[in-house]
Structure formats: C-alpha cells, structure tokens
Amino acid sequence: MTNLALTELYNLPDQRGHFGPYGGVFVAETLMLPISELTDAYYRYMKDKDFLAELDYDLLHYVGRPSPIYHAERLSREAGGAQIFLKREDLNHTGAHKVNNTVGQALLAKRMGKTRIIAETGAGQHGVATATVAARLGLECVVYMGSVDVARQAPNVLRMKLLGATVVPVESGSKTLKDALNEAMRDWVTNVDNTFYIIGTVAGPHPYPAMVRDFQAVIGREAKPQMLEMTGGLPDVLVACVGGGSNAIGLFYPFINDHQVQMHGVEAAGDGIATGRHSAPLSAGRPGVLHGNRTYLMEDEDGEIIETHSISAGLDYPGVGPEHAWLKDSGRAQYVSITDDEAMQGFHALTRLEGIIPALESAHAIAYAMKLAPALGKDKTILVNLSGRGDKDINTIAAREGITL
Amino acid sequence: MSRITPKLESLKRAGRKALIPFITAGDPTPEFTVPALHALVEAGADIIELGVPFSDPMADGPVIQRASERALAHKMSLRKVLEQVREFRQKDDSTPVVLMGYLNPVESLGYRNFVDKAREAGVDGVLTVDMPPEESSEFLPMLDEAGIDPIFLLAPNSTDKRIAKMGQLGRGYLYYVSLKGVTGASHLNLDDVAHKIKEIRQLTSLPIAVGFGVKNAETAAAISKLGDGVVVGSALVSKIEAAGGDTRLALKEITALISSMRSSLDA
C-alpha cells in the first residue's frame, strides 16, 4: 500500500545519508576522513555553476545525450496491451547508462586533485565506463573484477585493457561483484591520499547512493519532457532492472513526486526465487549492513552474505541501493523479479521485433514490461529503461544456447 | 563488569605493556579455538581479541580473509563464537575477551539478543570494524548497560574531533590502526605512530592498543613502547595457515610467537 505521506515532500537522504532506516556510513575509521572530504566536495560541486556546465558539456558532446525515447510498436503489439516505450541508454557512448555517472565522478575527482581512479565492476560496463573517462582525463585507473566475471565478460576485460586500465581479477569469496567491491574498498583504504573510488551503483557509504543517483537522474529528467512531447502525458508505469539499482533510480527519481506514475523495479530471479539461486534481495532478502550501508541483503540465518545467481553479471549482487529499500518499504515503488529464462525470452523478442539487442540486465526489464502490458489498457504507457546494449553478452548467450562461436 | 580496565590498570601499575593476540574463531577448525586461547594466555597474552568470521571482511588483508573463509567452511557463526567464549570461561575467568568483527552478523542476531548472549558468555569488549560511533546510538547504550566495552578504532587520519568523540564513547581501550591499509600490511613507520599517539594522548585518557603491521617480537617491543598494548593478528594467523591443518604444529607455532613477544615486551 502506498503511504504517500512518506514521499510527498521527498528530500532524502538526510544529512548523514539515511533513507529512513537504510543507507548511512558503515565503514572502518580510516575511510571516515576521505568520505567526509568526498561528501563536502559533492555538496559543493552539485551547486557549482562551472562544474555543472562542464558536466552538461560532457554529457552532450562526449556521452551523446540526450538519449532518445523509442516507441516499440511491434513489441507492444506482440505483448498485447499498453504501449511500450524505451529510454535508449544503450545508445550512450560505451553502450550503457553507467557512463553518466563515471563522467560526473571523474570530473569530481579532477576537482579534488586526485590522480588515481579505482572502480569495481560486475558485467564490466562500469569498468569500461570508468576506464574510458580515466583515459580521457589521463588518470591512472585500476578496476577490480571478480575472476568469475572476468571469465564471462572477456570482451569488456579487453576493452578496459585497451583503454589503459589495469584489471585486477579478485579471487576471494564468491569471486563476483561483491568481492570486487570489497577489494576496491581495501585499495581505497590503503591509498586514500591520491585515490578516488568511483562506485558504479547507488550503494556504498553515503554520499555514493545520493551522488550516483544525482548523476544518473539525467535519465528521468530527459524522459519527462520527451514523453510529454511524444504521448501528451507522463508514462503510467516506469520499468527498470535493479541490481544495485543505478539505472532504475536514475529513471525513477525525477518522477518520485508524480504520484500517478507507478514505478516497478525488476530484480533477477535467476533459476527462480523458490530455488534460492537468484539475486533478488528486495523480493526475498532482509535488511542488514554490507558495503557501507544498511539495505536489503541476501544472507543466511547467521548474517553471512550468500552467493547470488543471475545470467546477467550486472545484476549478480546480494545487496541493493538503500534508496530502493526505502522506496519498497514506503510503497512508492514496487519490486518484482524475472527469471533467467524469462529474461532470455525478452532478449529475443526485442532483438527480433525491434532490431535492438539489449543487455541481459535490460532484458529483465523488457520481459517484465511484456508481462505487465496485457494487464493494462492499450491507452496506457510503459516506459522501460533500456539501460545497455547486448553486444557484451553474446558469449553468454552462445554458451547458454549451445552455439559455438 | 568488563575485565579490561582492571587488567590494563594492574599492568600499568606493574610497568608492563598489554600483549593482545588476535585469532579468528573457528580457524582452522572450531575445535582448535578454545585450547588455542588457553595456550595463548599461558604463553603470555593479557587480553584476547577473537575474530568473528564474516563472508565480506572489507577491512582485512588476504591473511585474515582466508582465515574467515576457512572458519566459514566449517559453518562457524557468531552464535558458535559465543559458545566458544562460554567454554573458555569455564577454565579462565580472568582474561578479558574482545570480539572483533563486522556488524552484519550482530544485526542478524539482533542487538538485544547479541548483547544478552555476549554478557552471559563472558565477553568483555566488542569491536565492530564497520560501525563508526555515528551509527551506534542504538547499540552503545545496550553494551554500556550490559557492562561490555565498545572498543573503537582510531586511524592515522582520524581528526581531533573524532579522536575526542571516540575517547568519550569508547571504553576499555582505543585500538590505534598504525597505518592506512588493511590488516597484515607491512609499511609501518614507528615515528609516525609515535607522533600520532602523542596527539591522541592529549585528547583522551583511555589506554591505547596499537595494531596492524606487528610482525615479530622486535616490532612488538618497539610498538609497545609507544602505547599501552600491542595487538598481533595477521602474524599469528599466518602461522596457523602455514601449519596447513596440522593443529598441533599451529598451536606450537603461535605459542612460540607469543612467548617471544612476551619476553621482548618485558625485557
């Protein structure tokens, strides 16, 4: 049930980074000073005219914004119901929404006088987007990536290396995104003086969830007038996939106070929620503390983080941004899940019907929109955030479908 | 009441420094832990820091990460660590025990439930690496009420304001992390440590234990001169790891290291 009172005057997070009981700063003492320096810089530059002008310039000329909105007519007809529109973040430079954030954080790093950039990556999209901006600004760049992900996202590993980044395979724990994040934190704590840590999603300690959201909110800010122009109204439902949740929050945030617009976040159900092999903490987890913030987590009864599963490396994460935890509890957004098999159907449908190859992450959102559309009238509109393109996933898809490349 | 302050006061009166070994509970096996704690005390340990294994030990270097992984492979958990402390207390009612770990297992058990169980088991202090004082307003009063000391970390880049705050909220001792980095790192600079500890002393009267980067008897002795106690973790855990599952060898190696540190501290 939606409790509008909670979100009517939405101004979260509070000063210490809390979204209700979620978020916050849960880190070891050595990181408190760099985090407070970063928080100061973030609040200062988000109001600085020169900084914002430089950011706008880069988004326009380097990223290629604004990204268009596309009416997927054949996909809508196939689904049979509401009209499905796509926000084409896959058309950004580097092929996903991730670059909106790395461009912003890299500019911040430069203003703060940091000479070295580190990042974690799962699917490799954030790693590529980070290596890209580091190359452009001439900054040293180290990307941590779970060794399992290194194996399944080889094209992106090569891209990062070509861009001049050092890719460090992480062998600890489950060897995926969460462990890459642990390792990046360890690097940061060791090299705090010259290093800027570009987190790729709306997780981590404050100010990251708010800062990454603010850089990604360009998606929703553009989408509003674009939808008004194309359809004469705001969309009825927003749909986006949620791993850490940065593309979803980027689309949702500018609509939070438009209460007639529903927001649906799509988590990865992997083999199915009932099997336990999934990456859906909002659907099947409970609150806890990991990676600097309190949020919904996938954990066992002793509070140890459990291994997640998804066909999509970018959604394979046991936590989720704290703002999503809050939007779930407050009822402002709903969270659903899509299995690997359903995501594959969405992937093929969009590819065949519209000539757009989506990232496997985004395919979750497509699959859910196709499920939702028949339940809504033909006069209703669904806006899906097509967060990335699928070229990076062709090896995964070939392996799953028994094709030898 | 916590055993920490009386212990540190009596050491101070005797002109001695506290030797504080750290091992991860359940590493390499759950059966190893309690006998190892007794052996460490016999070899000269004054306070025990017992690591609670966690799946995502963000502030730890590879040595203690692997210790966590070995312990978790044996289904070690915070509940079981508390049982080990209770078992340790059956034969040792005087050596302070500090649990050191991450917040999530504590939140999973629930603050109230954890504090009750920890008090019953005989825990004296709790060091939660990823819970700064700003986030501890619910937890601290419960610990205080139970007579369990919250131990806070201080770092080389801690500001005066934060040092003063930790001095007010902390009990027992403050744990000074001697370098920027994770546990087991190796670039310790004694002059820097001495300088920072002098600064800390001006802001708080709590005793100071120094850790991170204490490799052998020589560094232990040098470090101990700067503070009130010295914590040795990765060096011990490395010995356990090197013994490769031979728990008798592991026990022999860690007691030998602590004995040598004891002698050089008292020399």
Image (cartoon, rainbow, N blue to C red):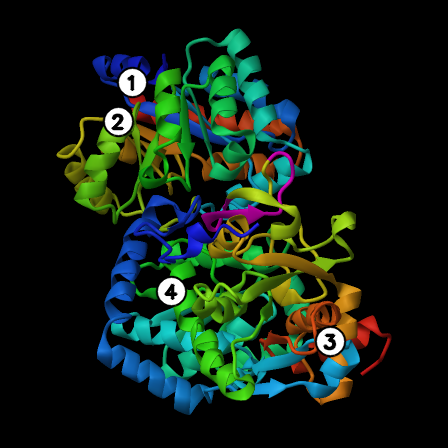
Residue B59 lies, in percent from the top left, at 44, 46
- Say if the magenta span includes residue A344: no
Q: Is residue B41 visible?
A: yes
Query: What residue sits right under mark 2 in the picture?
Result: B228
Query: What residue sits right under mark 4 in the picture?
Result: A211
* Label pair 1/2, CB-CB below 8 angstroms: yes
* Neighbours of disc 1 within 10 Å: few (<14), some (14-19), many (20+): many
Query: What residue sits right under mark 3 in the picture?
Result: A81
- The answer as to whether the residues below labels 2 and 3 share one chain is no
Q: Give the letter of the chain under mark 1.
A: B
- In front: A354, or A194? A354
- In front: A372, or B243? A372
- Residue A352 lies in quadrant: bottom right
Residue at 42% across, 10% down: B94
Secondary-structure class at tag 3: loop
At label 1, the amino acid type is: Leu
At label 4, the amino acid type is: Met
- N-terminal-most mark, 1 or 2: 1
Query: What residue sits right under mark 1 in the picture?
Result: B8
Residue A39 lies, in percent from the top left, at 29, 59
- The answer as to whether the residues below labels 4 and 3 share one chain is yes
Whether A327 is drawn above or below B177: the answer is below
Instruction: Give the residues drawn in magenta, as a range.
Output: A289-302
- Give the alpha-carbon distance from disc 1 to disc 3, as whole Å: 73 Å
- The answer as to whether the residues below labels 1 and 4 share one chain is no
